Amino acid sequence: MPHIAIKMYPGRSEELKKEIAVKTRDFLAQEMGEKFFSVSVEDIEKDQWQEEVVDKIAKDDLYVESNF
């Protein structure tokens, strides 16, 4: 079963996080032909972003980079 992990800055409501998770799951299920996905949403403080997100992503796994 594929898992999708979404990491973002804090400040969004639980309702919006759920909506994002459901829409992400539905889109990828359609695109990939998979039926079951799990989706997590984790808030990461801006001052911890580099350490908790950027530094943990292997370059070979990063397909789209952000342009801060």
Image (spheres, grey):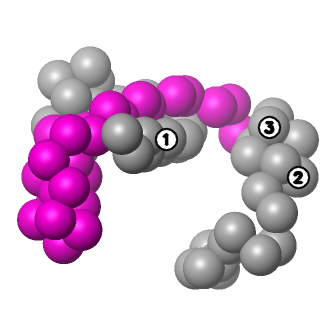
- How packed mark 2 is, by other alpha carbons closer than 10 Å (few <14, some 14-19, many 20 or more), is few
- Image coordinates of residue 29 in percent, x first then y, are 17, 57
- Disc 3 is placed on an element classified as helix
Q: Residue at x 43, y 31 (%)?
A: 41
The residue at which mark 3 appears reads as 52
- Image coordinates of residue 19 in percent, x first then y, are 15, 37
Q: Earlier in the sequence, mark 3 or mark 1?
A: 1
Say above or below: 38 vs 49: above
Q: Amino acid at mark 1?
A: Ala
Say above or below: 44 vs 68: above
Real-space Cα distance between discs 3 and 1? 13 Å
- Image coordinates of residue 42 in percent, x first then y, are 52, 28
The residue at which mark 1 appears reads as 5
- Image coordinates of residue 49 in percent, x first then y, are 76, 43
* Marking on residue 55: 2
Position of residue 15 in the picture relative to residue 53 (left or right): left
Camera-side residue of 28 and 1 = 1
